[in-house]
Amino acid sequence: MSEEVESLEVINLVVLEDGSTRAEFYCPGCKSKHSPTVKDGNWKGATWDFNNDLIYPTLKPILSSAFIDRGKKVECHAFVKDGKIKFTKDSDHELAGETVELKPIEK
Ligand SMILES: [Zn+2]
């Protein structure tokens, strides 16, 4: 039997040199990490409200990101509430319109 304790935390808080904090999580739609800023420090960009729960996080308002995958623009729009992520129908990936549980993140 393994004594290893698995973390249930789906959020990895990352503090940057400018004093801001990012709530990093794995997006199952994009199959990559999103890192919204939840504490601004000297960061002048957008910030999200975070309930400080690493297992059942809620982030407000909606998260939007866009990236280029194999020359094609992919947009991801999602709400994170109580540890679940709900993608809007206009997201450009297979989980558009779905709500799924966030998975524990590797730190
Ligand atoms: Zn995403």
Image (tube, rainbow, N blue to C red):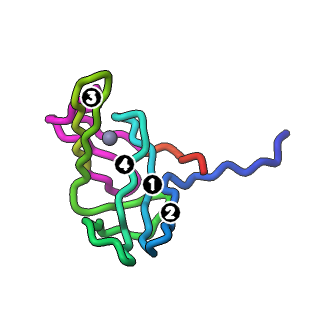
Residue tagged by mark 2? 13
Question: Which residue is at a point 26% across and 35% down the rendered structure image?
Answer: 98
Q: Quadrant of the N terminus?
A: top right
Query: Regarding mark 3 in the picture, which secondary structure is present there?
Result: loop
Question: Which residue is at a point 39% across and 41% down the rendered structure image?
Answer: 27
Residue tagged by mark 1? 24
- What's drawn in magenta, residue-wise? 79-101
Distance in Å between CA atoms under marks 4 and 2: 17 Å
Q: Report x, y in % for residue 51.
A: 38, 69
Task: Indicate whether 7 appears above or below 50.
Answer: above
Residue type (three-letter) at the residue carrying disc 3: His
Query: Regarding mark 1 in the picture, which secondary structure is present there?
Result: strand
Asked if the residues shown at circle 2 and circle 1 are in contact, with their CB atoms under 8 angstroms apart, the answer is yes
Assess disc 3: are there few (<14), some (14-19) or many (≥20) residues with their C-alpha within 10 Å of its C-alpha: some
Q: Label 3 CB, ligand 1: below 8 Å?
A: yes
Q: Earlier in the sequence, mark 2 or mark 1?
A: 2
Residue tagged by mark 3? 93
Task: Indicate whether 9 appears above or below 86.
Answer: below
Task: Indicate whether 22 appears above or below 80.
Answer: below
Q: Earlier in the sequence, mark 4 or mark 2?
A: 2
Residue tagged by mark 4? 84
Asked if the residues shown at circle 4 and circle 3 are in contact, with their CB atoms under 8 angstroms apart, the answer is no
Assess disc 4: are there few (<14), some (14-19) or many (≥20) residues with their C-alpha within 10 Å of its C-alpha: some
Q: Label 4 CB, ligand 1: below 8 Å?
A: no
Q: Earlier in the sequence, mark 1 or mark 3?
A: 1
